[in-house]
Image (cartoon, helix red, strand yellow):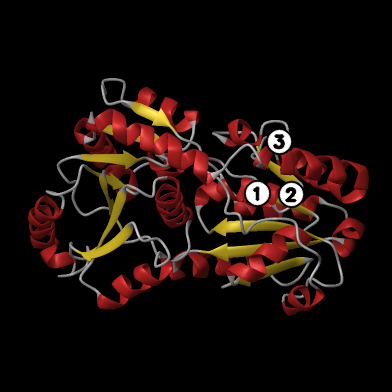
């Protein structure tokens, strides 16, 4: 089979980009007799980066095929869409199916495709009422469900959400769980790396994620500040944050008085190699999210041997099982209480560390690749 991928935006950080890269690699390794074609923009540098990334896989090819969504700017976006539609039809003629790993980021939808809907949080969360993002999702989601041969979701939770908000859909919606990269595993404590971030002298709670209303970072800060001064003086809170400059600046304006003080350490632009060590060295990973499609950081922490405190909402209980301390993320007292428990109980930390490693072993990219290939074959046949 010849399987195409929208590879216009799969480089860099972010859960959806990581998903695309890991899935493509998993498919290429599991199915060496099939071909996987990455359709990217006309940027020569982007094509070279993709070729370097997948260069050891002979059944992966990179083609410059479609324009970047900002090729002509916002004012002429309608022309970009028109050109994209023509080029998608031309570039997908020789393909059995195209996989849109981010249908909400694609300029247009090709004719024959499978899509992965990672989440629909702009629709499910009240925080996004009246927003441009919600309007876009309300328009694009039914279009995807109508035109796709099948829709893959990372969890049963997302499938249920799609069925709840779009009950008229007849498109097959199939959950295929994701996984953490093999690079996440227990490591020895690296004092040099920890010293670089001011985390070498005290145990620390860790959060990794975007500055985004659904991540509930203010709730985490409030829960940490509710700990006694004695606990905070012995145990830091490290926030590894990413996001667009306006979001980051707004966050700093709101919480700047607490950052890098009161036991809170604010970090940005942490290299991936260092992040592996932060996960392995943390006292606990705390993830009080309000809505997730899969919650990949939870698995990354578990696979790194880090105990996890996480939200009991959305897909997190489905992914974590009984391997994490699950709490209502909107209940600051309960969240703070769980942080206190793991800070003061080495036995509990060891128990959840063991449970987490065992739970993470249930997920793999080879499994995700096999289940995704079953979807391809079902829609092609």
Determine the CA span between mark 3 and mark 1.
15 Å
Decide which of 96, 307 is in the foreground and name it.
Answer: 96
- Residue 223 got which mark? 2
Q: Residue at x 35, y 69 (%)?
A: 51
Badge 2 density bin: few <14, some 14–19, many ≥20, Cα 10 Å:
many
Between marks 2 and 3, how big is the CA–CA gap? 14 Å
Where is residue 151, by image quadrant? Answer: top left
- Name the front one of labels 2 and 3: 3
Residue under label 1, please give it: 219
Mark 3 / mark 1, whichever is N-terminal: 1
Q: Is residue 105 visible?
A: no
Q: Quadrant of the C terminus?
A: top left
Residue 311 lies left or right of residue 86; in this view the side is: right
Residue 92 locus on image (x, y percent): 16, 50
- Circle 3 is placed at which residue position? 326
Callout 1–callout 2 Cβ contact below 8 Å: yes
**In the image shown, does 235 or 194 lie closer to the viewer?**
194
Would residue 372 be visible to someone looking at this image?
Answer: yes
Name the element at disc 2.
helix
Camera-side residue: 199 or 265? 199
């Amino acid at each position: 089979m010849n399987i195409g991928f929208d590879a216009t935006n799969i480089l860099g950080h972010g859960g959806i980009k990581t998903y695309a890269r890991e899935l493509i690699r998993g498919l290429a390794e599991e199915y060496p007799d099939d071909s996987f074609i990455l359709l990217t923009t006309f940027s020569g540098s982007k094509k070279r980066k993709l070729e370097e990334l997948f260069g050891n896989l002979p059944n992966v090819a990179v083609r410059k095929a479609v324009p970047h969504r900002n090729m002509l700017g916002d004012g002429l976006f309608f022309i970009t869409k028109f050109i994209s539609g023509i080029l998608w039809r031309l570039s997908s003629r020789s393909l059995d199916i195209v996989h849109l790993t981010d249908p909400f980021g694609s300029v247009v939808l090709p004719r024959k495709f499978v899509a992965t809907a990672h989440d629909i949080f702009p629709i499910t969360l009240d925080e996004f009422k009246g927003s441009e993002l919600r309007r876009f999702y309300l328009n694009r989601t039914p279009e995807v469900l109508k035109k796709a041969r099948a829709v893959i979701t990372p969890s049963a939770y997302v499938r249920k959400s799609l069925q709840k908000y779009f009950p008229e859909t007849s498109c097959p919606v199939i959950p295929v769980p994701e996984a953490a990269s093999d690079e996440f595993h227990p490591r020895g404590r690296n004092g040099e790396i920890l010293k670089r971030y001011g985390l070498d002298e005290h145990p620390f709670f860790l959060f990794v994620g975007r500055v985004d209303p659904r991540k509930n970072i203010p709730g985490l800060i409030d829960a940490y500040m509710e700990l006694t001064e004695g606990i905070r003086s012995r145990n830091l809170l490290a926030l590894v944050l990413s996001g667009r400059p306006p979001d980051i600046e707004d966050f700093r304006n709101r919480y700047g008085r607490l950052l890098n003080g009161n036991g809170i350490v604010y970090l940005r632009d942490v290299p991936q190699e260092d992040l592996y060590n932060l996960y392995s060295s943390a006292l606990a990973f705390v993830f009080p999210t309000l809505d997730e499609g899969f919650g990949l950081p939870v698995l990354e922490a578990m696979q790194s041997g880090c105990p996890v405190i996480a939200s009991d909402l959305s897909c997190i209980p489905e992914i974590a099982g009984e391997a994490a301390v699950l709490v209502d993320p909107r209940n600051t007292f309960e969240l703070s209480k769980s942080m206190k428990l793991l800070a003061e109980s080495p036995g509990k930390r060891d128990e959840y560390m063991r449970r987490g490693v065992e739970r993470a072993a249930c997920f793999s990219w080879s499994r995700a690749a096999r289940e995704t290939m079953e979807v391809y074959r079902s829609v092609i046949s």
